[in-house]
Each structure stands twice: as C-alpha cells, then as structure tokens.
Image (cartoon, grey):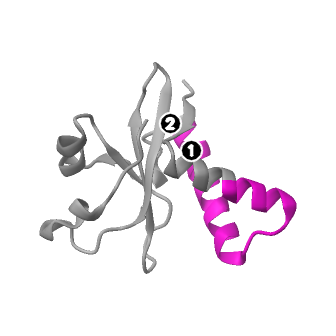
C-alpha cells in the first residue's frame, strides 16, 4: 500500500520546492544537497511503509496533544550531531501523508523540548 506524500503549507512546501529547484539547476550547496538526498530517501521509504525500520517512526504524544491529531516523527539521520527528524501526519485524505515539520532532534525531550517545535499546516 503506497501513500501519496504532501508537504505542509507554507513552510514545508517552500523548503522542498527550493531544494528541488536548486538541485535541478545545479545551484544547491553541499549542505542543502545532503539534506535533499536524505529527505528524498526518507520520503520514498515513508510512502512505501510509514513504519519502515530505518525511519524508526513513532508518535510524539506532546505534539499530538497540542495539534489535536496524531503527529509522528521519523528519522532522516541518526547518531550524528543535530540529527534531523521529519514530523508528519496521516491525511488529510485516505492514503495521504503530510509532512509538517523538519527539525533537529530536540536535545532533551523531558524538559519541554517539543514545545519549541513549530509545525506547518495541512
């Protein structure tokens, strides 16, 4: 079962479109190219299976409570300083996943680190 991937608006949509455009026209920086490749790889896995083992997808209860829907976190990277995480929700339609955030892993989830995460709209 495959899922269609959507980008949250406006932040995620703008970021993805900027990375894609710069990649295509060859003006992307090395750092952004790295993000584009890792994010693209994670999106492919997410569309095939949201619980793909290397994504380590799990619900973030604090964000689910704040946003009134289940918010999931998946890994783009692991075991690196500032490892990035992708935040997403199912929907708004059947077989859709919407990416609503891309952030470094919170330093300490126990001390309100998820309070600082701002997510896009569907």
Q: Position of residue 10 (x, y in %)?
A: 51, 46
> Would residue 21 be found to the left or right of residue 10 on screen?
right
Q: Nearer the viewer, residue 115 or 4?
A: 115
Secondary structure beneath dot 1 equals helix
Secondary structure beneath dot 2 equals loop
Residue 114 in the magenta stretch? The answer is: no
Classify 83 as above or below 11: below
Residue topped by disc 2: 49
For the stretch drawn in magenta, the main secondary structure is helix
Question: Are there few (<14), some (14-19), or many (20+) residues within 10 Å of tag 2?
Answer: some
Residue 26 in the magenta stretch? The answer is: yes
Q: Position of residue 50 (x, y in %)?
A: 45, 39
Residue topped by disc 1: 45
Q: Position of residue 41 (x, y in %)?
A: 62, 53
Residue pushed farthest left? 111
> Would residue 22 be found to the left or right of residue 98 on screen?
right
Residue pushed farthest top? 94
């Amino acid at each position: 079962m495959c899922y269609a991937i959507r980008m949250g608006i406006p932040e995620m949509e703008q970021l993805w479109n900027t990375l894609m455009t710069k990649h295509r026209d060859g003006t992307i920086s090395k750092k952004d190219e790295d993000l584009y490749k890792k994010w693209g790889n994670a999106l492919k896995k997410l569309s095939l299976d949201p619980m793909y083992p290397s994504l380590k997808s799990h619900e973030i209860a604090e964000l689910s409570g704040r946003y009134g829907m289940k918010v999931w976190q998946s890994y783009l990277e692991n075991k690196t300083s500032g490892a990035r995480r992708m935040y997403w929700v199912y929907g708004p339609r059947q077989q859709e996943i919407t990416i609503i955030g891309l952030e470094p892993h919170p330093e300490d989830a126990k001390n309100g680190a998820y309070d600082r995460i701002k997510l896009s709209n569907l």
